[in-house]
Image (cartoon, rainbow, N blue to C red):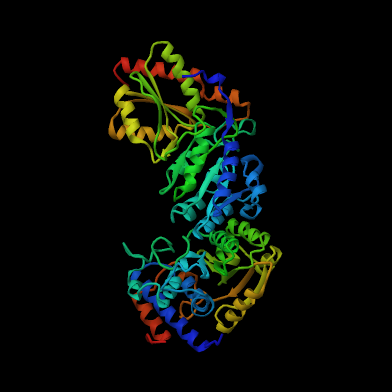
Amino acid sequence: MEVDIEHLKKIARQMRIDILTMLVEAGSGHTGGSLSAADIITVLYFYKMRHDPKNPKWEERDKFVLSKGHGAPALYAALGRAGYFGIEHFHTLRKMGSILRGHPNSTVTPGVEVCTGSLGQGLSQANGLALAARLDKKSTRVYVMLGDGETDEGQVWEAAMTSAHYKIDNLCAILDNNGLQIDGPNKEVMNIEPIVGKWRSFGWHVIEINGHEIGEIINALNEAERIKGQPTMIIAHTIKGKGVSFMENKVEYHGIAPTKDEYERAMKELGINEKY
Amino acid sequence: MKNIKDVKMLGTRDVYGDVLIELGTENKEIVVLDADLSSSTRTSKFAKKFPDRFFNMGVSEQDMMGTAAGFAAAGKIPFASTFAIFATGRAWEQVRQAICLPRLNVKIVATHAGITVGEDGASHHSTEDIALMRVLPNMTVIIPADGYETMALIRTIAKHKGPVYVRLSRDKFPVLYPENCEFEIGKAKVHSIGEDVNIIACGLMVSVSLEAAEELKMEGLSIGVINMSTIKPLDNDVILKAVKESGAIVTAEEHSIIGGLGGAVAEVISENRPAILKRIGINDRFGMSGSIADLLKHYGLTKENIKKTVYHVMEKKRSGGY
């Protein structure tokens, strides 16, 4: 497939603008982790995954599970820009009656596959989706994104064993390894290192990338598809708050929305809304 | 009413294992998951017959519930089995978040509920599971009273869309119903309605209540027995009819008196038609090790205690209430 990296970069920038616009209007939500995930989610929805926004339940589609459900604004930006729903819904994030809930909910948002938000559960659900596709001999591939802090949860490792035990190779996990969790750096709160060695020892094919380099993301996702007989984990080294200088690597932007003033400053950095 | 002592015994989990084979043959969408207890839950029979559609998840109940949710989200009909305390307690939040919130078609069929697990003791007893499952939106909660009701209900839930929790036991139960009995979700099985006291029971306590009622009738009382096999949605109409006839209710369950059948009946009665109520069950305590017979006696889950409680309730009625 012809890859237009510059085009994907433009989409990723638009995603960041959408994320911040949603969050400032909502007045609450998770800014840092949505921005760190934006490039990867862009590549998934606008390059890698086979999906049809006009037919969200297409049987052979690839599926994405945002296990770190608090990154919902990044997922909603992708779904809206891909055409699953009108982008006017961005203005309703977290408001009463909105189809865009605080955390992903498959019962109200077109394109959302499962309910996430309570950390540590998405990989198990992704395993079930992938095993079902295998039973049905479907070409579906399942992608699941985990947060690094999320891997503190024991269920993640139960599920990691399941993926390897059942040799689920139509599954690709991505770790948004931004190094920060709510209470501070992972290293201080709960050290997850050596994270590459952990996943390898659990029987996974592991690829390490810079999670903001579009080309590296594409190569890793393509490599994952070629790996047979074991699941793949892409450890994506990312920067929390990526794209807005004063939010980058700041733990305080984990669980809050930008203020009006911060939003204006961020928009100046990201540039005006522009068609891609 | 036939003498229960003479009837045959049937294991609800044994019936479950057999019906799964039948369902698996009929419907290729059915998959079964277990958490390293498949020989005890009897899902091992399905595993042998349909190895491609059986997934042993190892000792990881949380992952099992999440994986079952994924299967259901992809259109499969997963049956997930393990012991009741682990299915509902260990994995409660996975059941809540991944299964009930999206109203996925997962059938949680747990065995070894209550204290009739026996010698394994408190860690393996499940005396809170009805409460834990009943509180979840979108969840259906079913407790069969015998093997044939189990057979009918497993067939029924396979066709029902949405999450279901079924509570089965390790021990065999006396057979109460014909082999071809019907099961309708949310509809109580009314054995009789009495004018003195009505006993509302579930699971093993239905047959124990029937024995007690038989003796109480011989002693001249008008006693009804209702098998409330669906705890959620609850058959409010039958409860209120029983209250109307007798004004006095005794509930009996192999579960904590807090939050289970007794709790559910208390909610309905107090909001609609206040009446005298006494709940028989585990009285806010943990289980302990012992033989099944000794445990049932210790916790008052006996014919004798039901009779005693009925007389106590009758006395309250006579003295004008509380």
Above or below residue B34? Residue A12 is: below
Tell me where residue B65 appears, x and y as whole percent: 55, 52
In-front residue for pair B249/A138: A138
Name the image quarter holding residue B251: top left
Tell me where residue A48 appears, x and y as whole percent: 54, 77
Name the image quarter holding residue B191: top left
How many numbered marks are there? 0
Above or below residue B246? Residue B114 is: below
Tell me where residue B22 appears, x and y as whole percent: 57, 44
Name the image quarter holding residue A25: bottom left
Residue displayed at 65% across by 48% down = B49
Above or below residue B180? Residue A93 is: below
Horizontal side, residue B49 vs residue A58: left or right:
right
Q: Is residue B6 visible?
A: yes
Q: Quadrant of the C terminus of chain A?
A: bottom left
Q: Quadrant of the N terminus of chain A?
A: bottom right
Horizontal side, residue B22 vs residue A51: left or right:
right
Residue displayed at 44% across by 79% down = A16
Tell me where residue B296 appears, x and y as whole percent: 55, 25
Above or below residue B2? Residue B145 is: below
Q: Is residue A249 visible?
A: no
